[in-house]
Image: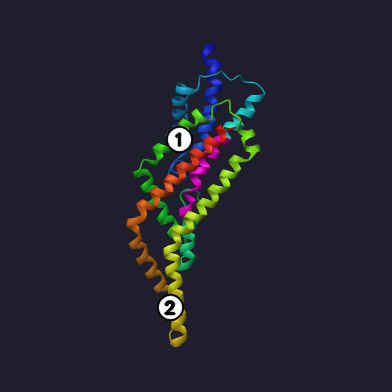
Amino acid sequence: MELVLAYYPNLLLIFCRMTGFFITAPVFATQNNVPPQFRIGISVFVSLLVFFTSGTDGAIPIDVEYVYYVIRETLIGVLLGFVAYLFFTVVQIAGSFIDMQMGFGIANVIDPMTGAQSPVFGSFKYMIAMLLFLTLNGHHYLLLGIMDSYQLIPLNNSFFAALADGPPTELLTRSVSTAFTLAFQMAAPIVASMFLVDVALGILAKTAPQFNVFVVGMPLKILVGLGITLLLIPGFLALFQTLFATLFDNMFEMMRTLRSV
């Protein structure tokens, strides 16, 4: 009983990190598709697995500093999950660019991840990205990553010192910049095509003023956008594989940054 009481605080700290991770991580944090009971349950089971493998290295007493430890571990889990989720927003940003050009910007749907309104093409690409992520066992790599985080960021870490020194903040800023760059690259073919359609409609309006380009332009842009999307679908696998590789690279780079302090 004394052994259980000695290491029980370690288990609670591990549970705090897991809960913070599953609140923000992609796939697991989907509000409408993943019930809270499942997220709590998987946090408990993963916490037990981590506890039996690396949670008994040193007993942590419950004292005044224990509240500080709880906040620290929760923030670590939220930060790692947010880095992973950040690269899933690339699909939504790219969809917003495409919708503004195709005229779908006035029609939004509910995003299952956040519960907020999102663009039509963003939701379409998000569903494809989620299916490919599950097909490529990305959720397994997420679980492996958060479980291996205790090899790089143990319970007796210096998380707030790392934040004060700045490397995690710089890495997070670079991750946001990389996400926007990937979003521009993902939306570039359709956005460029829509620009050419606008140029063609402008020339048509000057050469044949009797045509109402506002009536003809909208269906034409939708048809061209859907046709180009149909041509680009076979390349989605390689595109999203690059996106997922960048996701895991930044996630493990964040772990190494927190470990280096």
Q: Which residues are magenta?
A: 75-92
Identify whether 213 is placed above or below 75: below
Sequence-wise, the earlier of marks 1 and 2 is: 1
Residue depicted at 48% across the width and 56% down the height: 183
Residue depicted at 55% across the width and 37% down the height: 257
Name of the residue lying farthest toward the top: 2
Look at label 1 and name its amino acid.
Answer: Gly
Kindly report the distance in space between the C-alpha atoms of the residues bearing marks 1 and 2.
50 Å
The answer to whether residue 99 shows anywhere in this view is yes
Query: x, y (%) of residue 163?
Result: 63, 38
From the image, tell me which residue sits under label 2.
200
Query: x, y (%) of residue 46?
Result: 45, 29
Residue depicted at 43% across the width and 76% down the height: 217
Q: Classify 10 Å Cα crowding around label 1: few (below 14), some (14-19), many (20 and above).
A: some
Majority SS type along the magenta span: helix
Tell me the tag on residue 145: 1
Nearer the observer, 211 or 109: 211
Identify whether 74 is placed above or below 126: above
Identify whether 201 is placed above or below 257: below
For residue 71, side relative to residue 40 (left or right): right
